[in-house]
Image (tube, helix red, strand yellow):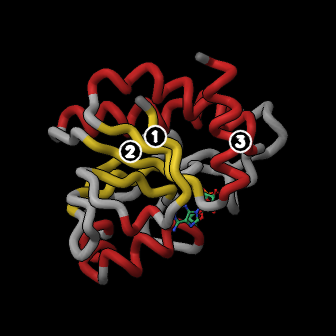
Amino acid sequence: MIEIITADITTLEVDAIVNAASNDLLGGGGVDGAIHRAAGPLLLKYCKTLGGCRTGEAKISPGFELPARRVILTVGPVWSGGDAYEAPLLRACYVNSFELALENAVHSIAFPGISTGVYGFPKEAAAKIALDVMLQYEDRFDRVIACCFSEADAGLYRQVLKAKL
Ligand code: AR6
């Protein structure tokens, strides 16, 4: 079952948390900044060896000082009106993160709302894509967590999930 929670993703004790990163993987604000602060400086050092990440793709690192064992770094699309392949690119973020998780024996995974902050992806459309892919993969994991950062976002996720079931 997909778990929809309101939490700071950096506090979760799971096999992997997913980071909504930027193409250079060198940190930033939002959830990315929070993850780098909580993981400590070794995360940035490690990310510098990864050679960046294309939009829609995913890479993996250790969790360093985080309670999570791993960080899966993915780069969501910047919303620019909807005609620039934003939806398939966002879907690819979730699919590629799950595939990388499966390759790395990750059994519990938590996702933030990729692209729904600074990158401006409309929240309801993003939640539909996120939950669609989560439903596709949930059977292959012990825990799949949609980690929202506000009760309002969690409410939206619950509403979207209910409509899909
Ligand atoms: N735990 C869970 N969710 C969070 C947290 C947290 N600690 N902090 C923020 N969120 P954003 P993006 C939610 O802007 O839109 C960075 O600078 C937030 O409420 O972090 O993909 C990167 O380096 C929102 O719903 O990511 C990139 O340059 C969601 O996380 C750029 O931002 C994503 O918001 C990526 O932008």
Q: Secondary structure at mark 3?
A: helix
- Local crowd at mark 3 within 10 Å, few (<14), some, or many (≥20)? some
Instruction: Quarter of the image for the C terminus: give it.
Output: top right
Q: Determine which residue is flagged by label 3.
A: 156
Q: Give the residue displayed 29% in from the left and 72% down from the top.
A: 43
Q: Kindly indicate whether the residue at mark 1 contacts the one at mark 3 (C-beta within 8 angstroms).
A: no
Q: Determine which residue is flagged by label 2.
A: 58
- Figure quadrant, ligand 1: bottom right
Q: Which amino acid is tagged 1?
A: Glu
Real-space Cα distance between discs 3 and 1? 13 Å
Q: Which amino acid is tagged 3?
A: Leu
Q: Determine which residue is flagged by label 1.
A: 3
Q: Nearer the viewer, residue 140 or 53?
A: 140
The earlier-in-sequence mark between 2 and 1 is 1
Q: Secondary structure at mark 2?
A: strand
Residue 23: image x %, image y %?
Answer: 50, 57
Q: Kindly indicate whether the residue at mark 1 contacts the one at mark 2 (C-beta within 8 angstroms).
A: no
Residue 115: image x %, image y %?
Answer: 63, 50
